[in-house]
């Protein structure tokens, strides 16, 4: 036995050496990996990573259900689909709408449309749908009845009366998927209904359904069937990053690390487009000192190198954000010319120190200290597991340390993070704002005191708890203004408030991670043709699926 | 008899404690089901302020006091009615568990038995041939592989056997176009998909059984009755299996009982990596979405089966080793 035990270390060393060598050999081989590329070219079939089973699919196509299949909003169309990049509405079941005054919306309903079971669609279906959401508030996930007072149909027109003068409400209330009166009127409880055989007006109907994969088939009687290029959508339940690069998807939505070498090289014609979808910002808790001091916030803002933060967090795929509160270049038309440098804030240590000294912090040695000589310490809260945000925060930590501020990072689980920011239980939190496509909604969610709640009470927007009567007045004015020149004038003043008061510190734009393949279909949304976002959920796919073209046709 | 009654009393007491803890623990987690749903939505895009209210109404998030929730919960446990899942609303918890359980029971269960049988036999051999390569090879590689984390082994297998060599599918329990049924083709398909996850569990759990059996067996081999049996000139195989191994297997048997009880909990990491529709994946979904009803049902199922397995092992022990009965 003693003999045996003495021999062990040498054998262990040998075993380790062999293992290591084997690992090196095998990893060397991996460079020659071939991709399968289930070639769908010519068949008109589109492999679509739009819906994840967890891990398998449950058959639920109720378009208002929280656990619906994502494609329910492709089967059921709304009146209009808003491109959240520029806020423009494309006509679907509505052909046009007018706002005769700020309290009324009149919609022309499309004629000659049929449900996929052959019955005719009419304005009555539209009214029925909105009344359904009123009767069952659990279905009203976007809150249309917070804006609507009543709705009525007359002939091919539907008129909506709003509760108050509310011009921006149009984008919210017109976006509801419309269901058929003749089928849904008999459903006793539409909240728990799973609508296993959906009958919609949309470009696709449900085909084969299995727990691991289902198909949507082109609707031959669709009212703009000539614009629908893909004859079939194939939706697998598992869409891991490995699957996406491996299986030759036509359209996927995923953040791919090193996208040029992973996605683009995985198949011929693979492209990507990552437009900005929101502004990732530091939210200072404005109910607490020193964060309630505007000089302190300006000091933080000037201390940050936003380009470096954007590059570290998102591998250089997104741009640094300015302090205008707008998503650029999406909302370029709205940008105020009064803002210096288009609202961008450059890193300027001297300026930062000047602001901090106005706020009562001075640099002593390599530390920034308060009047009592204690080093300034900031706790930043971000959600555990959102690794890109974490990398961004770590870069912030590094940059602030360079100016003498100690930063600690809190990483609660996502649900706990959500609770913390809603209750104002943080010093500085990482958060995202904007991206609704509406300048009013973006600014209102960020700055309106209508969401102002004391710390400890949950709110759903304005987490930093900003309040300024002047800004509230501007928002109220923007809400009732129909004239676009006047709207822009008000938006300019809101941007100025963002720039001067620094309610949040914009850092970089969160990307919308669109991965496309040109092998079977072209004309995907892109930087040069931003007719839709790359999002694979909601009504956005309707825009894309009616715009792409078959290769070779 | 008194021994069995005493153990039974203990079982009931621990079961009650487990059921109560099971009620309290999910509620001690920060955040609420609606927060979890919102955090998930917020990651995908901006969430409108109205969404939270609608989600709460839709989920029917518990509103009553903690006391009344507890009484209601106890009543539901007795009736085995666990309500409706938040995450997979409007599916019932029972239907979710019933559809996940067979996958875990068959895949994880068979592998656990297989690992125990192979590991124990190899352990016996290693102890009997101690000091030779038949000992050092399994012992060393067992030490090595049992230190592998599940997910790491799983990712290695996915990458090399699934992605580079393309021998096996990388995810799912059956093919894309298949739907669960009992036909031969489906079962073959399911078996094919089970190989990688099963291999992962086998690789990582085999080492423990080998080492455990080998070490106790070596102790047993030093006992007087083994020396006596050898001195009597009994055949090697008889001494190894019927004298030494039979006594040495007792601790391993306890471990096996517990492992079998734990099978219903599934293998969370393995099932997550392979997108395997078992209980482990369901548990992962329940926890990340703060799905109280689903979590309660799953934790309850796991604790009860571990308790029952423990109880059975205790009773067996009473018969195998009379000393424990006192």
Image: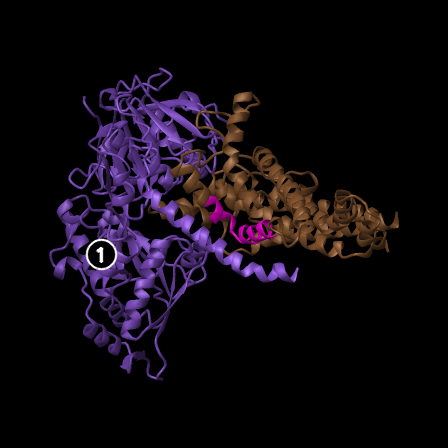
Chain colours: A purple, B brown
Residue B148, magenta (yes or no): yes
| Name of the residue lying farthest toward the top | A118
Q: In this rendered view, identify the residue nearer to me: B232 or A431.
A: B232
Residue A548, image x and y in percent? 22, 29
Magenta stretch, residue numbers: B136-155
Vertical placement of A377 versus B88: above or below? below
Q: In this rendered view, identify the residue nearer to me: A381 or A471.
A: A381
Q: Which residue is mark 1?
A: A320
Q: In this rendered view, identify the residue nearer to me: A94 or A194.
A: A194
Report helix, strand or loop for mark 1: loop
* Quarter that holds the C terminus of chain A: top left
- In the rendered view, does A474 fall on the left or right side of B259? left
Classify residue A213 by image quadrant: top left
Q: Which of the chains bears the disc numbered 1?
A: A
- In the rendered view, does B14 fall on the left or right side of B158? right
Vertical placement of B309 versus A500: above or below? above
Residue A153, image x and y in percent? 31, 26
Judged by its main secondary structure, the magenta piece is helix
* Quarter that holds the N terminus of chain A: bottom right
Query: Is there any visible trace of residue B72 in the rendered image?
Result: no
Vertical placement of A437 versus A378: above or below? above
Number of on-image labels: 1
């Amino acid at each position: 036995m003693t003999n045996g035990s003495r021999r062990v270390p040498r054998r262990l060393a040998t075993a380790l050496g062999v293992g290591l060598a084997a690992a090196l050999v095998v990893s060397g081989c991996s460079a020659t990996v071939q991709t399968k590329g289930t070639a769908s070219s010519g068949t008109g079939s589109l492999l679509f990573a739009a819906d994840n089973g967890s891990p398998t699919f449950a058959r639920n196509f109720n378009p208002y259900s929280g656990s619906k299949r994502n494609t329910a909003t492709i089967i059921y169309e709304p009146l209009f689909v808003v491109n959240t990049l520029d806020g423009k509405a494309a006509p679907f079941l509505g052909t046009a709408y007018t706002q005769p005054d700020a309290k009324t919306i009149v919609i022309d309903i499309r004629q000659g449309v049929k449900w996929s079971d052959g019955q005719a669609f009419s304005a009555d279906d539209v009214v029925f749908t909105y009344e359904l959401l009123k009767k069952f508030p659990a279905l009203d996930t976007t809150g249309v009845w917070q804006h609507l007072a009543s709705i009525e149909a007359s002939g091919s027109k539907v008129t909506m009366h709003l509760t108050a003068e509310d011009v921006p409400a149009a984008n919210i209330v017109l976006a509801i998927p419309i269901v058929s009166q003749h089928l849904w009127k008999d459903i006793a409880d539409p909240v728990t209904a799973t609508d296993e055989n959906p009958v919609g007006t949309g470009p696709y109907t449900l085909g084969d359904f299995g727990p691991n994969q289902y198909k949507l088939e082109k609707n031959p009687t669709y009212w703009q069937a000539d614009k629908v290029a893909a004859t079939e959508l194939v939706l697998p339940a598992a869409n891991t990053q490995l699957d996406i690069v491996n299986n030759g998807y036509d359209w996927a939505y995923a953040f791919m690390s090193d996208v040029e070498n992973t996605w683009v090289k995985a198949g011929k014609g693979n492209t990507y487009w990552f437009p900005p979808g929101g502004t990732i910002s530091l939210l200072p808790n404005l109910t607490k000192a020193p964060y309630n001091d505007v000089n302190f916030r300006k000091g933080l803002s000037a201390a940050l190198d936003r380009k470096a933060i954007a590059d570290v967090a998102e591998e250089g795929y997104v741009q640094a954000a300015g302090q205008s509160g707008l998503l650029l270049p999406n909302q370029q038309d709205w940008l105020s010319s009064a803002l210096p440098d288009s609202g961008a804030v450059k890193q300027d240590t001297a300026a930062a120190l000047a602001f901090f000294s106005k706020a009562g912090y001075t640099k002593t040695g390599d530390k920034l200290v308060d009047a009592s000589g204690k080093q300034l310490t900031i706790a930043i809260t971000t959600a555990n597991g959102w690794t890109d945000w974490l990398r961004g925060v770590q870069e912030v930590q590094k940059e602030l340390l360079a100016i003498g501020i100690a930063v600690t990072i809190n990483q609660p689980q996502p649900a706990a993070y959500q609770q913390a920011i809603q209750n104002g239980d943080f010093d500085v939190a990482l958060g995202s704002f904007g991206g609704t496509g509406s300048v009013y909604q973006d600014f209102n969610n960020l700055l309106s005191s209508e969401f102002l709640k004391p710390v400890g009470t949950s709110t759903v927007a304005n987490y930093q708890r900003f309040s300024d009567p002047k800004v509230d007045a501007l928002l109220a004015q923007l809400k009732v203004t129909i004239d676009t020149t006047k709207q822009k004038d008000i938006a300019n003043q809101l941007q100025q408030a963002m720039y001067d008061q620094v309610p949040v510190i914009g850092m970089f734009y969160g990307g919308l991670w669109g991965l496309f393949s040109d092998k079977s279909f072209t004309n995907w949304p892109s930087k040069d043709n931003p007719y839709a976002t790359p999002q694979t959920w909601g009504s956005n796919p309707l825009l894309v699926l009616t715009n792409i073209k078959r290769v070779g046709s | 008899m008194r021994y069995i009654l005493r153990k039974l009393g203990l079982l009931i007491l621990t079961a009650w404690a487990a059921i109560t803890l099971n009620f309290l623990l999910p509620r001690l987690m920060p955040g609420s089901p609606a927060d979890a749903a919102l955090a998930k939505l917020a990651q995908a895009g901006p969430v409108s302020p109205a969404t939270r209210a609608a989600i709460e109404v839709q989920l029917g998030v518990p509103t009553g006091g903690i006391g009344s929730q507890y009484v209601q919960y106890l009543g539901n446990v007795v009736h085995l009615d666990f309500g409706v899942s938040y995450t997979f609303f409007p599916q019932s918890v029972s239907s979710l568990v019933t559809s996940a359980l067979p996958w875990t029971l068959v895949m994880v269960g068979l592998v656990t038995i297989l690992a125990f049988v192979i590991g124990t036999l190899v352990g016996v051999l290693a102890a009997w041939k101690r000091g030779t390569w038949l000992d050092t090879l399994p012992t060393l590689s067992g030490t090595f592989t049992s230190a592998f984390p599940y997910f790491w082994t799983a990712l290695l297998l996915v990458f090399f056997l699934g992605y580079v060599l393309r021998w096996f599918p990388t995810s799912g329990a059956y093919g894309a176009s298949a739907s669960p049924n009992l036909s031969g083709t489906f079962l073959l398909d399911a078996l094919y998909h089970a190989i990688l996850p099963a291999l992962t569990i086998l690789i990582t759990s085999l080492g423990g059984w080998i080492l455990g059996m080998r070490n106790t067996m070596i102790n047993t081999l030093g006992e007087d009755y083994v020396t006596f049996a050898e001195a009597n000139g009994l055949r090697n195989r008889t001494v190894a299996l019927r004298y030494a191994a039979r006594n040495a297997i007792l601790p391993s048997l306890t471990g096996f009982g517990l492992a079998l009880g734990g099978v219903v909990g599934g293998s969370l990491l393995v099932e997550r990596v392979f997108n395997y529709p078992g209980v482990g994946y369901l548990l992962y979904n329940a926890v990340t979405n703060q799905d109280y009803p689903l979590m309660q049902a799953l934790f309850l199922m796991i604790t009860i089966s571990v308790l029952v397995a423990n109880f059975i092992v205790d009773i067996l022990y009473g018969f195998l080793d009379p000393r424990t009965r006192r």
